[in-house]
Amino acid sequence: MAEDNNQAAQGQEQQLQFSLQRIYVKDISFESPNAPAVFQQPFKPKVGLDLNTTHEEVGENLYEVVVKVTAQVSHADSGSTSFLVEVEQAGLFRIAGLEGDQLDHTLGAFCPNVLFPYARECIDSLVNRGSFPPLMLAPVNFEAMYAQKKQREAQGSETTQ
């Protein structure tokens, strides 16, 4: 009987648990270094986009995942910066019952997919408040980004052996 209870308790511990605890902006920045001159010419944007994700364990089965998006928009003809916007959208996720590659995949692909729409909305709002046309970023395939990262890591480990 005690063994059955012990096995049942272990089965509950092994059960997958995933919950989003909180979504928040960790860092935010908007700069328009050439205003108001930038508004005196036709808006011909050239967009440079940088995207990065990080994660770390901040408690028992509690992970912070951060999606950092930086967009620099320049005038296509002159090259002068129209605006620079940077958002670090973060979330706290409680994850139990996953280990190794499964946990890494969840933190590196699934969680950023949850956070990215919030980062997109935040960037669009900042750009709008800066008096520029909306900057609606296209959806991002974090699954593909994660696969590319794993491929680079595998190639890196092959060259060091």
Image: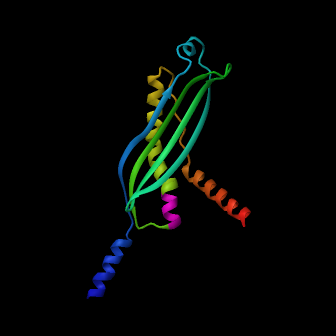
Front one among 55 and 103: 55
> Would you place residue 76 above or below residue 2 in this image?
above
Q: Which quadrant of the figure contains the C terminus? A: bottom right
Colour mode of the rendering: rainbow
Q: Residue furthest top?
A: 40
Residue at x-position 51% and y-position 21%: 132
Span of residues in magenta? 100-106
> In the picture provided, is 136 more to the left or to the right than 152?
left
Give how far across and how far down residue 100 sits, in percent: 51, 67
> Would you place residue 74 above or below residue 123 in this image?
above
24 falls in the magenta region: no
Quarter of the image holding residue 47?
top right
> Would you place residue 11 above or below residue 78 in this image?
below
Quarter of the image holding residue 14?
bottom left
Residue at x-position 26% and y-position 87%: 2
102 falls in the magenta region: yes
Residue at x-position 59% and y-position 27%: 73
Task: Count the numbered circles shown.
Answer: 0
Residue at x-position 60% and y-position 13%: 41
Give how far across and how far down residue 18 sits, in percent: 38, 59
Give how far across and how far down residue 160 sits, in percent: 72, 63
Q: Which quadrant of the figure contains the N terminus? A: bottom left
Q: Is the magenta stretch mostly helix, strand or loop?
A: helix
